[in-house]
Image (cartoon, rainbow, N blue to C red):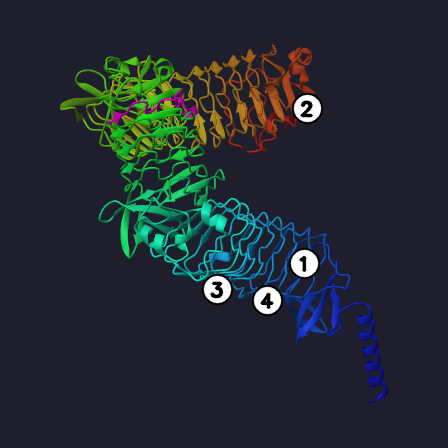
Amino acid sequence: MNTIKKLNALLLLLFCSFLVNAGVPSDTDFMCVNGIYYRTIEGNNVCVTYKDMQYNSYSGTVSIPLQWAGDGDYNIVAVGKCAFKDCPNLYQVYMCKNILTIDSCAFQNCTGMGSVDGFSGLKTIGNFAFENCSSIVFFSIPNSVTSIGEYVFKDCTSLRQVSFYNDKTTLTVIPKGMFSGCKSFEYYKMPNTITTVCDEAFRGTGIKELTLNKTLTTIGESAYRDCHNLSELQIAEGTQTLTIGNNAFDGCTSLKSIITNALVPPVLTNGLGLTQEQLDTLILFVPRLAYDAYCQAEYWKDFAHIEKTNYDFASNDNNYGQIYYNIIGDDEACITCRDSNYNSYQGTYYDSFEGGRGMGIPDNVTYNGKNYRVTAIGENAFRDCTGIDLIDWVNKDRIKSIGPNAFKGCSNLRYVNLPQKIETIGAHAFEGCIKIPTMWFRESVNLIDTCAFMGCSGLKAIEFKSSMRLGPKAFSGTNLRGYDLTKGVAIFCSLWTPPVLADSTVFDSTHYANSVIKVPYSRVEHYRNTENWGRFTNIRRMPYDFKEGNIYYRINNENEVGVSPDNELFYGSYSGNVNIPETVLFEGKTYQVTSIERAAFYFCDISSVTVSNSVKRIGDLAFAKSFVSTVILGDSVETIGYGAFNESSLKKINFPKSVKHIGDSALVNTPSLSTITVDPDNPYYDSREDCNALIETANNRLIAGGSKCTEIPSSVTSITDFAFYAKDGLSRITIPGSIHRIGNHVFVFCENLSQVTFSEPLESIGVMAFGFTGLTSVVIPNSVDTIQEAAFGGSSKIKKVTLGSGLKLIGQEAFSPGSAQTSIDTVVCYATTPPVMENINCFNGAYGRATLLVPQASLELYKNDPNWSQFYKIVAVESSGIDEISVDDGTPWERYNLQGLPVGDDYRGIIIENGRKILKP
């Protein structure tokens, strides 16, 4: 060995000796990288370790990487023995996916650590690995884990739940003392692979309920000792052999009963690990069919109290939890309770909306190789199940009956959507369910029995849709004052023939005096004259009398009916394509369909409606806010009400010659309406010159225009309010000289409208007439004397405003840009007397940036006016006024003639350029 090699060997020996003396693990190389200590295991594999024998090497949050590069690349594959031991200020550890092993005592006494994440490939967890980690609440064990040591979670006092990823694992043993001392540990779903629970595995935990899987064969000594909260022990169906160690359940002071679902008594090789006192006091519930067998079986017969359960068999489906059934037919079963203690269910899943516990009801169940349809909820099935707040029926067509007391005392039950084929609701079925707010009874229901909803103090509204019998006190003790969404209506009864009330006690006297009831439109007097129903003081009309097919109808007279909505609260009753017939049969009589009533299709998701030739009247708001795109009007329609198609998706419409009256705002806010036509033979309305607009013939008033209408006939004298409201397809419009008045909100929200041409003798422009349009310039003729409030408000792209000589009044916020920033940089006003501004906000935002040009002779008048003087720059312009001026098409003109019209570079004469008057030769 040469001198250099000898020296290196000596130095290495000295360094290792130093490490040993310093208390650092020195059996292999020792490294510190980015605050984490490592030692090599084999080859390039390393594990995380501690700094020295004082432990407490880490704090805060630690992230373990996949690799680190030293003298070569090292893979981090383990958390070594005692690596994080005694680190009270360590809060969180993120592990790389390469970690295969968490060695013994790895996190022992890390009292501040709340979570350990990221070990998806973990295979081994050593003894005492997380002992006394008193801040950990939840822990998930990867499916990859094949070996777990003893006392892994001992004294983790905050630990509430341990689960396996996807509920799958290959583990067969719960090791010795695994959860010992975990007093907060309440819930544990034992994997179906587990065959052995070792000594003290759950000793002193807070577990409340325990089901021993049929795969379980061995329970060690004191396995569940001192579990003071354990109130119920269940043994699964199919369990055959059990070896239970001494004192397995000693000290379980809350244990009241043991329930076995095994039809054949399991063989107990060493008893049940119970004390003699427990054998004398506990109740053993056994299957009805196996009662005699348990009374004679070794060890089982030692129980002083053996009782039969209330069910034929139990099914522990992963989706629904354990549910108890009775066989009620060759292939039918009903859900029942476990025993006479009731409270058999606590819900099987969390409701994602409010965090409550939901109960899923399956439509089929298999027992002894045979499939049974679940067709009923049996007597007392969910009685006193206070842990359930939601019932979810998987198959809403299968359940036919809800038995007596089925949900009695379910004080947290808040939502029950009854099955679609439900026929009977038994006596006291929902008694005391104080949180149910509404109940909508299906058309299939024929009986609501005695006291069915008695004491449901939270019940505010109910609906009956079928002829049924209501038993005594069925709704006694309920609120029935109307739910928020029912606008005070407590009882909806859409039946032509009133349901049969057993006697006057079905409802309370306070209901008869104060609750509002709605009945079919034409049947108010009939209900008032019916025994017991007549006790109600407040009986009102529903919007319809009956339903035929998918259409609701109201009887208007002896021979006629109208199409109606089914409610006046949510509307939206119809969908798809609707064809209105000419006649309909009800109660043996044929009626002619002559009207579409008010709001009949309001807010409905319909695509098209074909109106029969028998219909004469379309009511107010009949199609308002609906998604209808096509309405084909019959040849007999005479009247169309106010707002009939307001805010609808209508694309085209043809008015027949029969139409005599169209109400205000009938076609307002229909941005998709591109085509409007009127039968040429209609004497009241027209669409002259193919103008694509609706015009009232007698007074030449334009009522509504299409989204692509660009030419207004010269014979039109006025444009009514909202005529082009929200017709965003418009880009330009010419106002002919025949028009004297533009109404309110005519072009509001026409955001693509960039050009408008005005002509004299226009006199006034209405409120918000051009609000929120895309106009870039506005020129008002000399004939206009009034611009009303917010006439151009919100049109923030306007750069120049030219006002004619006849202007007398400008309404408040007439040219205000709204919430946007104004673009106005030039205002020209030819009026010699400053027009009156209703307030200072007429040109809000423009006073400091725009130039105001006014007649020379009136310059001082404008400067002294309290509102006009707000313009920072006021200059004179010579002109006699505007004869006929049109708005430009958006070209950024900078030069104007004395009439305020934009001019090009080739113009010769006196011009206004950048606010100054110059002569251009």
The amino acid pointed to by label 1 is: Gln
Q: Which residue is mark 2?
A: 848
Observer able to see residue 680 = no
Q: Specify which label sits upstream in the sequence, 2 or 4.
A: 4
Where 148 sits versus 757, above or below? below
Q: Which mark is residue 108?
A: 1
Q: Residues within 10 Å of mark 1 (few under 14, many from 20)?
A: many
Q: Is residue 713 left or right of residue 787?
A: left
Q: Specify which label sits upstream in the sequence, 2 or 1.
A: 1
Q: Which residue is mark 3?
A: 170
Which one is in front in this view, the residue at disc 2 or the one at disc 3? 3
The boundaries of the magenta stretch are: 468-486
Quadrant, the C terminus: top right
Q: Determine whether the residue tagged by mark 3 lies in a helix, strand or loop.
A: loop
Q: Is residue 744 left or right of residue 597?
A: right
Which one is in front in this view, the residue at disc 1 or the one at disc 4? 1
Q: Which residue is mark 4?
A: 100
Is residue 234 one of those drawn in magenta? no
